[in-house]
Amino acid sequence: MEEIVQEVELDYQPRSVFLDFHERKQRWAVIVAHRRCGKTVSCINDLIYKALIEGKEDGRYAYVAPYYSQAKNIAWDYLLRFSKPVMAKANQSELWVELINGARIRLFGADNADSLRGLYLDGIVLDEYADMRPRIWGEIIRPLLADRLGWAVFIGTPKGHNAFWDIYNNATNDDSWYAKTLRASQTGLLPKQELEDAAKSMTQDQYLQEFECDFESAILGAYYGKEMRQLTDQGRITKVEYDPMYKVNTSWDLGYSDDTSVWWWQVVRGELRFLDYHGSNGQPVAFYTGLIQAKQAEFGYQYGLHYLPHDARAKTLASGGKSIIEQLSVKIPLESMKIVPNLGLQDGIQASRMALMRSWFDAERCQDGIESLRQYQREYDEDRKVFRDKPRHDWTSHAADAYRMAAVAWRVEEKIMTKDEPIKGLFVGKTDVTLNDMWAIKNTPNNRRI
């Protein structure tokens, strides 16, 4: 029987800067690209092309944007338009297209990355990876590619030295990766006059980041940019061991419709040592009490206090009229839970800045939390072209808020000095220290006889 060959023509003319990308042989690829260079269009068409020619049985391919709404608003129309000549059917409610060979391409949002669990993938594109949680690749996506030897493409614009920078930096020294940088000054895709006008109306950091793909530019509007750079430069993001001589505290941010975040930390001789971090969504309170117990069993933590935000007292109908504190107290002793004083957002941010100057983080177990603190930003007012005096609510918010709970608790419990004050001490020889001064320094009297 003669094999029937069907010839189709896709409505896509690749830009010259993407020709070698479409012809690549490497399994892994990363593209750092300036705004409006057409990277999303290119990658959607790369998915369609490979889904057609790879010949995988029941092929499954995915495109992931930082948010599901982004995938729907930006990539869905592109997928419908460019797959039309080879489309068998489409499902708009689930954002997938099935091609004439049975392969399926589906759009996802990294804000609900758990929806990918249990699937298999032959190829995936992660768009604007710098805006995604760092662990989404290693914990969720990479395993989905294993049994089918699937491929992956990371694309985006820089946002400081984060997970996207790590991938790009490693790829440039690894022949098994395709790596490319597309700067506006080199591609010629945008008119020179337009770039000159953009440079006049943007800050230098904005322009270099968005159009010249500069990873060194400061993250715009970041609350803790200076403090996080110092943390990195001073080597305070490292391996942090649990010290059994000191209690482990936790601090929480409670999400009712989105993420709940928890930090595990110790105070050791004036240092805040952050041992672990966890953030997830859609989980019941029992999940987090189980997590607290699991960490204790795994690492031997001896708990001190569990610091909760002021809304932990609120009772909800969905929980049978019980507050978060009441629900947690089923497995966590009530006397070990404490409500953090509600100082207000700006005072809390100042407390966080102070705490960051004395903080150490475990690089591996706190990875997501560290990246959240780096990228925690002010909301931007597009009309006035200024940053508002309030945070942008995104995936970084919950980890930053939970850290703020730790910072406020530390400031209150340790009675941290908020200005340069003389440190009282006991000196040998002539001194002005009085008996009252010495008693004020001592927390409890020493009744031992000398």
Image: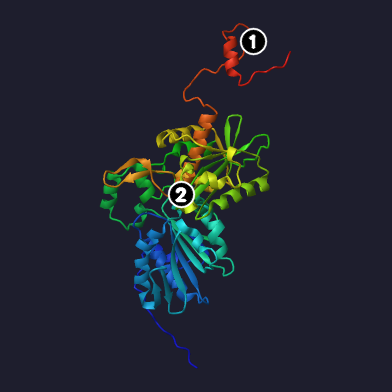
Residue placed farthest to the right in the image? Answer: 450
> Tag 1: residue type?
Val
Residue 62 place in picture, x, y as percent: 46, 66
Classed neighbour count for the residue bearing mark 2: other residues with Cα under 10 Å, few (<14), some (14–19), many (≥20): few
User: 158 or 310: nearer the eye?
Assistant: 310
SS of the residue at dot 1?
Answer: loop
> Tag 2: residue type?
Thr
State the mark number for residue 428.
1
For label 2, the residue is: 316
User: 105 or 295: nearer the eye?
Assistant: 295
Q: Tell me the residue at 52%/48% (across/down).
A: 368
Number of numbered discs overlaid on the protein picture: 2
User: 145 or 349: nearer the eye?
Assistant: 349
Residue placed farthest to the front in the image? Answer: 321
Residue 446 place in picture, x, y as percent: 67, 18
The C terminus lies in which quarter of the figure?
Answer: top right
CA distance for labels 2 and 1: 60 Å
